[in-house]
Amino acid sequence: MSSQPPNPATPPLPVQIWGDSHPGQVREVNEDSYYCPTKQTQSYKKVDQAALSSKGYLLIVADGIGGSDLGQRASREVVQSLRDVYYETPLAGTLDQRLYNAVQYANDSLYQMRTRNPALGQAGSTVVAAVIQNNYLYVANAGDSRAYLIRDGQASQRTKDHTLIAEKAARGLPPADADQGVITRSMGDKPAMPADLYTATILQDGDAVLLCSDGLTDMVKDEDLAKVITANPSRKAVEKLIKMANRAGGPDNITAVVAKIGYAKAAAPTIVLSRRQKQIILAVVLILGIWAIALLLLSSNTNNSGSVSATATPALLPPLTAPAATSPAAGIPAPSRAPTVTPLVGTPTDTPKPDVPTVKPSDTPVKPTATEITPSASPTVTCPPGQIPNPPLGCKPESGGGSNPPTARP
């Protein structure tokens, strides 16, 4: 029997419950049945608030045994009889005693149905039932359907599996292949079935409770159960868990009922991905990373090319006016004024001024080029005896020797 811990002096925390069931990917008939009082469940209506306050929230999951219609009928009988006797009859005793007696009543009801109808053969069912009231959790079970408490992101199993594999493991014995799927305790097999009743648990703000069939726990690990339930509201968590079991193969019927306790908000959603999905995401991330690096390199090259081009382009020169005199050998423009020839010997009678080229400013600067100045007419030079004219520089010795020739003075 369960022992009830002291009740903390706190008001009851709110409870949000959702449940659902799916046949899976292999079986045509869903032999699972479930119940939660706050939604329309199969043929069961919602329970009014007065009943919830006085008797608490009753949660049930039953997994039928016997195959096809037999298992389905057995699980439905267990859920209906347990629900009816708990909410609609005046059971005596403490709340955990009332839960235990309701499970026994459901067992007797299925056993009597089999006795009256031999065609049902070995039809039976597992069961896990829980009641949440005044921040307490009460649990009872028979078979391998489980109850979990999720707290601080961790899932702890609150029930024992009544299977041959689990019993051998408890005794330190190795399992055999033939042990797989063998149930050692089930509903309807005997007129008095000893269900297990567990110590009541005080619930905290942020806790969650999961009831489920083995179609879920055989396909989804406990740590993944905890992640999904912690990160999502009750309804979303149930939907995600069923999808995960189906993605993993869904060889059996899948049923889950989730109750979230208190006011705590759901944590950031945690996405549980398959190995193939992780590989695809990794490949996409790598491709996007390479593409981003290529764009950065291309942008860098483009910027560098633009800088070199701007440096190589000469700055525009200002419009030319009167360039200064420079050496003709350097390819610089000729002087803007004509040179004046002054002979060393003698005085010329007439020295015409050559035309001076002028540079007209234009809108578009041009590269200056050397300009050759040609006098419009040769000047007339009178030379002393022994010299001859040498335009445009003046006179020179008649024989080419003697004194140095005159030089032009700028």
Image (spheres, helix red, strand yellow):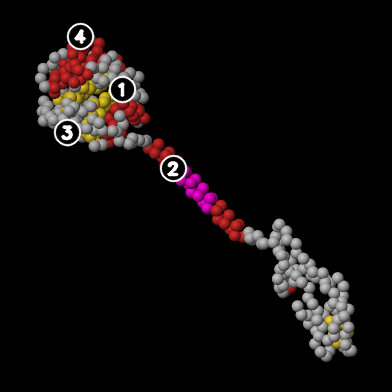
At label 1, the amino acid type is Ser
Question: Can you identify the residue that label 3 sits on?
Answer: 170
Question: Can you identify the residue that label 1 sits on?
Answer: 21
**Rendered image: mark on residue 285:** 2
Crowdedness near tag 1: few (<14), some (14–19) or many (≥20) residues, C-alpha within 10 Å: many
User: Chief secondary structure of the magenta span?
Assistant: helix
N-terminal label among 4 and 2: 4
Of badges 3 and 1, nearer the viewer stands 1
Q: In 3D space, how far apart are the residues under numbered discs 4 and 1 (Cα atoms)? A: 29 Å
Q: In 3D space, how far apart are the residues under numbered discs 2 and 1 (Cα atoms)? A: 36 Å
Residue 105 point in image, percent of width and height: 16, 16
Q: In 3D space, how far apart are the residues under numbered discs 3 and 4 (Cα atoms)? A: 37 Å
Q: Residue at x 57, y 57 (%)?
A: 307
At label 4, the amino acid type is Arg
Residue 93 belongs to magenta span:
no
Residue 288 point in image, percent of width and height: 47, 43
N-terminal label among 2 and 1: 1
**Rendered image: mark on residue 116:** 4
> Magenta residues, as a range?
288-300
Residue closest to the eye, 24 or 232: 232
Residue closest to the eye, 11 or 405: 405
Residue closest to the eye, 2 or 306: 306
Residue at the bottom extreme?
Answer: 402
Could you tell me which quadrant the N terminus lies in? top left
The reply to whether discs 4 and 1 touch (Cβ–Cβ < 8 Å) is: no
**Rendered image: mark on residue 317:** none
Residue 337 point in image, percent of width and height: 77, 72
N-terminal label among 2 and 3: 3
Q: Is residue 82 visible?
A: no
